[in-house]
Amino acid sequence: MQKASLKLVKDMQISQVDKRIYGSFIEHMGRAVYGGIYQPDHASSDANGFRNDVKELVKELGVTLVRYPGGNFLSGYNWEDGVGPKDKRPRRTDLAWRAIETNEVGIHEFFDWAEEVGAEVNMAVNMGTRGIDEARQLVEYCNFPSGTEWSDRRIANGRQEPFAIKTWCIGNEMDGPWQIGHKTAEEYGRAASETAKAMKLVDDSIELVACGSSNSQMPTFGDWELTVLDHTYDYVDYLSLHQYYGNPANNLEEYLACSLDMDEFIKGVTAMCDAIKAKKHSKKQMNLSFDEWNIWYHSNEFDKTIKPWLIAPPQLEDHYNFEDTLVFGTLLITLLKHADRIKIACLAQLVNVIAPIFTEENDNDSPAWRQTIFYPFMQAAKYGRGTVLTPLIQTDSYSAGHYDAIPYLESIAVLNEAETEVTVFAVNRSREEMAFSIDSLGLKVTGVTAFTQIAGHAIKAVNTLASNDVKPVDSTRYAVSEEGVTLQLEPLSWNVIRLAVN
Ligand code: AHR
């Protein structure tokens, strides 16, 4: 039996949670758009061809912001192809994913969909084949009220009021040699700062995200951040981080530790932001947008077999299992631990493509369903609102692979806005049951409002259209006393504990 404890101290706070930390991502690739959110021949589709069953699941998931339209796709995209009468829109080769893009869905359709699901749009501008001119025109098209060429084109295309898009990404993964229009840090840094200036001259209320590294293993990681920040520090508001994890070696203990890597990555990028701040004698704090994160590896082999130049082929369709859900929970907790710097985060992606929501292929009747990773995200988006408390944890640890001192307990607590409830998110990495005690200072725990666990499944168990077994279930294995609460955490479990406090 493992033992672990968490102390809640009301005045030891990390930060308010920015609700945009529960963002996601829709890229024009695979079956994310076509056959995902949009499928005119599906039984549940609305008059515009968007699936109502998918919309309902996106709302249930609690996504607050959706990054769009890419991803690698962005770097070859002409946004003008996706506006105006649908029968006049061109079919194009999508060079990033070597597929055919029909442009049936563009900014207008996507924005209306995002409004319906209650999420804001985080728009991205193409820095691969394009640059300043396109970016300033796109901001004018989306955000300028009227009376100019691009704002009047928006109105002519059916949208009187500006889209008023607040958050914009300046390109995507421009450090990656695979990226169309890949740049050195110097080239991107200069281009991004000039593009940012022009975009903010059109609309000074927008916030901008500059590209950080595509992942922390990139050979240019570090140099890229420092150089890009040196050029863009005064003009942008966030630096991006991207990272995907997997278990190709099939080593559960090691896989469960990958949130330690994410933690190091965030600390490193934060340190680089602060180094440039000091160098520039700046008063401004550069915040972070972790705008691609997830688990991605199950589909790698299948993706090599997909033929080029198809419309919406089934790319990057990972089927998530129980162990992925545990890892996913530790990643969510890690993002919350850094709520003082991470103000935006996007689970990549949302539907079918490495996604929590799945639809059946070539099927115009079956409903969309929830993958295993759906549930931790949904619970965090719903209950992880308010103020993150500093995690004061005692737990034993283990070593696996290249990780030392992997804590058996990963946990974080969030005090809600009304200060009436604390939600504790906890992963028990151990294969043993864990006696978990929570005590508090400055907050009196008066009861347990709910205690759910995802536990007890075969490591590789998945959800499907027909079975939805990997999901939270209630537990009554807890006791409340004057000292606090003690709970029994199942071996290998994701736990959400809502405590009533005053
Ligand atoms: O999310 C899938 C891809 O991963 C994105 O297009 C790209 O930005 C990243 O490499």
Image (spheres, rainbow, N blue to C red):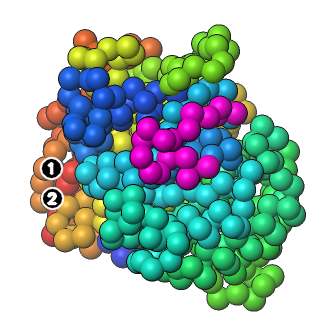
Q: Give the position of the C terminus as an image quadrant.
A: bottom left
Q: Is residue 296 magenta?
A: no
Whole-percent x and y of residue 474? 17, 33
Does residue 77 appear in this view? yes
Camera-nearest residue between 388 and 110: 110
Is residue 357 toward the left or the right of residue 341 in the image? left
Q: Is mark 2 within 8 Å of ligand 1?
A: no
Camera-nearest residue between 37 and 399: 37
Q: Give the position of the N terminus as an image quadrant.
A: top left
Q: Is residue 94 magenta?
A: yes
Please tell me whether mark 1 sits on a helix, a strand or a loop: strand
Residue positioned 65% across, 88% down in the render: 283
Q: Which residue is mark 2?
A: 500
Whole-percent x and y of residue 485? 22, 50
Q: Quadrant of residue 296?
A: top right
Relative to residue 147, is residue 295 depicted above or below? Answer: above
Whole-percent x and y of residue 271? 71, 67
Q: Which mark is residue 448?
A: 1
The type of residue carrying mark 1 is Val
Residue positioned 25% across, 59% down in the render: 422
Please tell me whether mark 2 sits on a helix, a strand or a loop: strand
Whole-percent x and y of residue 46? 21, 36
Residue positioned 22% across, 38% down in the render: 47
Relative to residue 39, is residue 388 depicted above or below? Answer: below
Q: CA distance from mark 1 to mark 2?
A: 6 Å
Please provide the residue range marked out in magenta: 78-95
